[in-house]
Amino acid sequence: MTSYHGTQTMKPATAAKKLGVYLEATPAEFREGAVSRDEFNALQADPPEWLRELRRNGPHPRPVVAAKLGVSISGLARGGVTEALTTEQIEALKQESPEWLRRERATQAEVRKETVRLKERRAEKDARAEERS
């Protein structure tokens, strides 16, 4: 008895998220249909011009905006940034360096330092436990 495995697909929103692009800025044919695993792999391996353009100039989804600004997604919201931004708008924000952005970058730096500290602490505990056993 053989089982039939259909082609694995994902919703356009999922594919856009995995590709790091803003769904509403993608072409209509991308937004309107399911994306097969093969189509998704092809988009990653050899991105069409529209995908390269979106990655280069945006508009970018909030996770990408946050990463480019060096803040968390929550930090973006606290700063009043709720919509997708273009690369040009992100660069303008970096140049302006408003107070909220400086504050959120400092917060993000502290979070990263604390994450490293906790990781090192766990590694030390694991090493001590390994020595005892």
Image: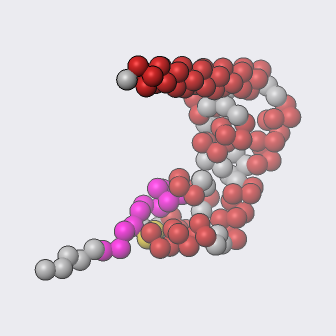
Residue 96 rendering spot, x and y as whole percentages: 85, 31
Q: Quadrant of residue 70?
A: top right
Res 84 seen here: no
Name the one closer to the observer, 24 or 71: 71
Residue 106 rendering spot, x and y as whole percentages: 72, 21
Name the residue at the bottom extreme.
1
Residue 19 rendering spot, x and y as whole percentages: 57, 58
In the displayed structure image, the side of residue 42 where residue 57 appears, left or right: right
Residue at the (70%, 54%) spot, across then down: 58
Residue 47 rendering spot, x and y as whole percentages: 64, 69
In the displayed structure image, the side of residue 83 where residue 68 appears, left or right: right
Number of marks in picture = 0
Quadrant occupied by the N terminus: bottom left
- Residue 34 included in the magenta stretch of the image: no
In the displayed structure image, the side of residue 98 where residue 72 appears, left or right: left
Res 20 seen here: yes
- Residue 7 included in the magenta stretch of the image: yes
Name the one closer to the observer, 62 or 9: 9
Residue at the (82%, 28%) spot, across then down: 97
Residue at the (72%, 63%) spot, across then down: 53
User: Start and end of the magenta stretch?
Assistant: 6-16
Quadrant occupied by the C terminus: top left
Residue at the (41%, 19%) spot, across then down: 132
Q: Is residue 58 above or below residue 107?
A: below
